[in-house]
Image: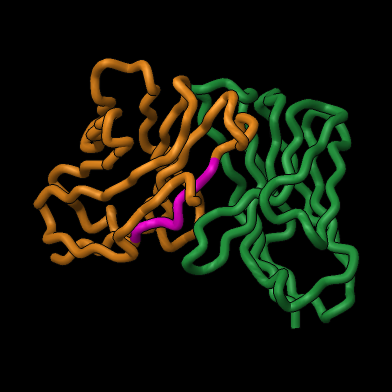
Chain colours: A orange, B green
Amino acid sequence: AQKITQTQPGMFVQEKEAVTLDCTYDTSDQSYGLFWYKQPSSGEMIFLIYQGSYDEQNATEGRYSLNFQKARKSANLVISASQLGDSAMYFCAMREIYGGSQGNLIFGKGTKLSVKP
Amino acid sequence: NAGVTQTPKFQVLKTGQSMTLQCAQDMNHNSMYWYRQDPGMGLRLIYYSASEGTTDKGEVPNGYNVSRLNKREFSLRLESAAPSQTSVYFCASSEGAVLNTEAFFGQGTRLTVV
C-alpha cells in the first residue's frame, strides 16, 4: 500500500484564485511529520511547509497553508491567491520515526499545478 | 551558501558503462540520501546514510552502490548501467531522522543510458 497518495496528477487554477492539492497518508505511528515540496520546471526541490502530527494548529507559511485532518489522515496544501510562478509539480512527503521508512522522507507521486492567466 | 552540491548535472552513458555521481553538503548534516525521480513515480529512495560510516538500502537499491566517504560526501555508483536507470537523480541531506527536519536537495543529475 502506498504511504502517500496524491490523487490529482494535474490541476488547473486561475491566477489569483485559491487551490487545494490533496494528500492522504498511511501510517500507524503516533509521531510523524508531513512536508510539501515544490518542483518548478527548472527541477530543483523547494521545501514549502511542515506539519507535525502533534501540532494542534494547521501550519501556515505566507500563501501556503496545510489543511491537516488527522482522523482522515489527510494533509492538503492550500495555495491562496495563485500566481503564475506557482506553476510546478508539488510533492507531499512523510517522515515516520518508528515506521518502516526508518526516518526517511517518503514521497507521493506528485501533482502538476498549472496556473492560467 | 552552497547547501547540497551534485555533480554532474547531465550524463549520457552507454549500456554497461559505469559511473559515480558525487554529492557533498556543507550543512554538517548527519543523514544523506539518494533518490531517483521518474515520470509519474515521484521520488523513490535508493540508498540512505543515517550517519558517517553507515549506509542502508532504500526502496529501489538494485543496480546501485553507495559510499559515505565522510560526513560531507555521499556518492552513488552505477557499476553496469542499464536503460532502466535512465532517470533524474537527487542527493539530499537532513540533520537526521528528526521529525521536523526537512531534507535539502541538490540540483539533480539527469542521466540517460542508451
Q: Is B73 covered by the magenta stretch?
A: no
Residue A62 horizontal side relative to residue B31, left or right = left
Q: Position of residue B51 (x, y in %)?
A: 77, 26
Q: Tell me: A93 left or right of B55.
A: left
> Is B67 located above or below residue B90 in the figure?
above
Q: Is residue A77 visible?
A: yes
Residue drawn where x is 72% and y is 69% of the image: B85
Tell me the quadrant of the picture where the C terminus of chain A can be found.
bottom left
Vertical relation: B43 (above or below) A78? below
Image position, residue B22 (x, y; %): 78, 50
Q: Is residue B1 visible to the viewer in this orientation of the structure?
A: no
Give the extent of the magenta segment.
Answer: A106-111
Q: Give the left or right position of residue A98, taking residue A55 as reference.
A: right
Name the spot of residue B88 as percent of width and height, x first: 62, 63
Query: Could you say where residue A39 lies in the image, as x and y percent from the top left?
Result: 43, 53
Position above or below: A40 against A78: below
Q: Quadrant of residue A116?
A: bottom left
- Tell me if residue A32 comes above or below residue A15 in the rendering: above
* Residue at the outermost bottom position: B114
Q: Residue at x 42, y 36 (%)?
A: A35
Picture residue at 36% right of the left edge, 16% below the top: A54
Residue A107 in magenta stretch: yes
Q: Residue at x 23, y 58 (%)?
A: A84
Quadrant housing residue B20: bottom right
* Of residues B14 and A96, the one drawn nearer to the viewer in this rendering: A96
Name the quadrant containing residue A62.
top left
Q: Judge left or right: residue A12 versus residue A98.
A: left
